[in-house]
Amino acid sequence: MGFFAKIKEALKKTKDAISYKFNKLFTGGVLNGEFYDELEAILLSADIGSETTESILDELKTVVDKKHITRTEDVRGELKTIMHDLLDFEIPEEEYPLVILMAGVNGVGKTTTVGKLAQLFRKKGKSVTIVAGDTFRAAAADQLTVWAERAGVRIVKQGEGADAAAVVYDALQSAKSKGTDVTIVDTAGRLHNKVNLMEELKKIDRVIDREFPGAMRLNYIVLDATTGQNALSQVDLFNEAIDIDGIVLTKLDGTAKGGVVLAIAGEEEVPVVYVGVGEGIDDLERFDIDDFVSAIVDGE
Amino acid sequence: MGVFSGLGDKLKHVFTKLTSRGKLDEYEIKQAMREIRIALLEADVNFNVVKDFVARISERAKGEEITKSVTPGQQVVKIVHDELVELMGAKNAKLDVSPKPPTVVMMCGLQGAGKTTMCGKLGALLKKQGKKPLLVACDIYRPAAINQLQVVGKNAGLEVFEKGTQKPVKTAEQAVRYAEANGFDTVIIDTAGRLHINDELMRELEDVRKAVSPTEILLTVDAMTGQDAVTVATTFNDRLDITGVILTKLDGDTRGGAALSIKAVTGKPIKFCGTGEKLGDIEPFHPDRMASRILGMGDIVSLVEKAQEAMDEEEMKKMEKRVKDATFTLDDYLVQFESLKKMGGISEIMQMLPGMSRFNISDKDIDEKRIERFKAIIRSMTKKEREHPEIVKSSRRRRISAGSGTSIQDVNQLLKQFEQTKDMMRKMKNSKGRMPF
């Protein structure tokens, strides 16, 4: 399946749910209060959140006034532009050696994403080491080992209950000596409001900075697309702890609409970089704003 | 008010304005309803559920209850609370037991909801209640899922039945037979996380259901789930006729609006909540308490129960007497720290106290490590020092700080805090003479 096809497949559910309503709405005819109420309902039920929904609608109304738009069909393009601009961030080019630190709350799909990312970089011809930094969850290292085998990359791990920062330290020493291009660090899922666990994450972050100063650093938070407005709090607190560079949005192959990404973009200014679109090892794609917005608004 | 303020705070904010007025006019009701709506949406309650809910509240608020009441604001708070409780189910539902053992419990849900962990917690809870549960590994897809259940089972002291990656239906059937033959009264089946729209995997669950006729089919849902909770719950319920819901990760800072949504669309009770990463972090779901918590009214009942569980009664009486006699020592302080920990940490307790939620206290603000330090300090003291902390002067402080691996400042801080606590207790003795819990 090609690049666009896969994203579209993943967003099909989003599309089915939202764009049906959009299509109905945008062929409706006249702009009135009811139209905006319906539009609000659609945005809200897509997890976009009340604040962002309100600001999107306000902006839309301003544009509609300024351009003297009177027909609902013409609103579609304007809405897309607004949503696109919200999501549009400059994402730095990846440089090597690269160390990616993955973080997130429990059950969002961090370990799976590490496996998929490893595959992605290996297919680009890069040498990859993945690090089993989740020393807490039962059998997490076993799970990651399976992914390492699938992706055909090296894994560094220690026993359960080992100090995560120590595992990372070891991994970085060997990555440096072997000249590994990409080191991907898996970490234990942690709720963002637990201070001890966030401190542990900060320590891992510091160890990477200290031990591999020559490497490009990317800290990704993995978000479950099914998550509601709590995703904002997650990004906020993880960002506060370790400076998040980007989001990997997982489980977009369900019926979850992923609209929380717009809320995050509006309120936290953290870009989405990758999307997880299935359980297979190749089911990870670069986030494409046009595709995302278009799939939601146009239903294609 | 930012996005992270709670529903309770939002409503309180609304009703602070309301209570300052004697009567409500239609415009004010409309304003209040608007803010309730936004608060509920921010809490991730499903859009349609919110619509119905607000319409209901609005209707009731317009009724005579309000105009006749002396404090309309309070009346509205009560209406909102009552309706929330009603929406979430009238009272706490227990686990059903099959008349003919073993009772089969099947867990299901999306990926990452916390099924495997919950299997362990549920098993441990049942074991504590004197039952003999068997865990069954039917997640044959996720790498190392069987290993995970085995580790979880080992930690909980429970036997795990697994047959590798053979078909889950077969494993489930064999497990039930094994349970019958070996005196297990409960069988808890862990299944793979799956998308509700994955027809093939949903059929697999239907097959397991047909084969072992579970008494309980529990849908495990992440409390942080957004609008989609409705779709997920509806689909699982339509296909499997679930008997209840388990809400996980409630120890986060989520508003948990999904709880409302799911109950509203499935009509199935929420039976348990996961409230932490430890095996004991499972609690029965109390709709009224949840409503109170969401509303920021505090959860005194829960707190009292927890306190009683954590501190045995004798210990409590002894301490109460010491407080009364003002002979409270650092040893008692240590006991208090210990029970605090058993109760799930300070932040959890804070959340349950009325009025505390508005300070937005979380683990973020309270460092539990500090308590660990305090405990270490007390343990490094001699018996005499613990009973008479006033004798701890500079050389003793140096020794204690070295012995406990803390700084002198920590020791000073502890002693100061202890003095303050003692002071507070003296005052309390004069008023009521009761323990703070």
Image (tube, grey):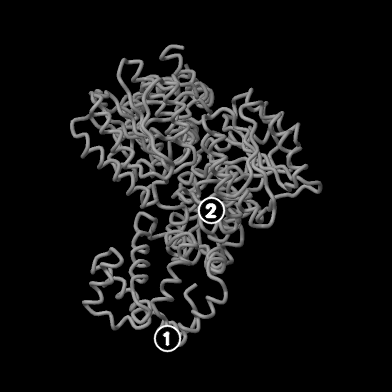
Residue A111 percent across, percent down from the top left: 43, 32
Please tell me which residue is depicted at 67% across the width and 39% down the height of the picture: B106
Residue type, numbered disc 2: Asp
Vertical arrangement, residue B218 with respect to residue B296, above or below? above
Residue A164 visible in the current orientation: yes
Residue matched to label 1? B326
Residue lying furthest right = B100
Residue matched to label 2? B281
Label 1: which secondary element: loop
Residue A50 visible in the current orientation: no
| Chain to which the residue tagged by mark 1 belongs | B
The answer to whether the residues at label 2 and label 1 have Cβ atoms under 8 Å apart is: no
Residue B125 percent across, percent down from the top left: 62, 53
Residue lying furthest left = A214
Q: Which mark is residue A60?
A: none
Vertical arrangement, residue A101 with respect to residue B375, above or below? above
- Nearer to the camera, A66 or B199: B199
- On screen, residue B196 versus residue B254, left or right, reads right
Residue A276: quarter of image = top left
Residue lying furthest top = A2
Can marks 2 and 1 be said to lie on one chain?
yes
Label 2: which secondary element: loop
Whole-angstrom CA distance, mark 2 to mark 1, is 35 Å
- On screen, residue B409 versus residue A28, left or right, reads left
Residue B267 percent across, percent down from the top left: 67, 44
Dot 1, how many residues are within 10 Å of its Cα: few (below 14), some (14-19), or many (20+)? some
Residue type, numbered disc 1: Ala
- Nearer to the camera, A120 or B78: A120
| Chain to which the residue tagged by mark 2 belongs | B
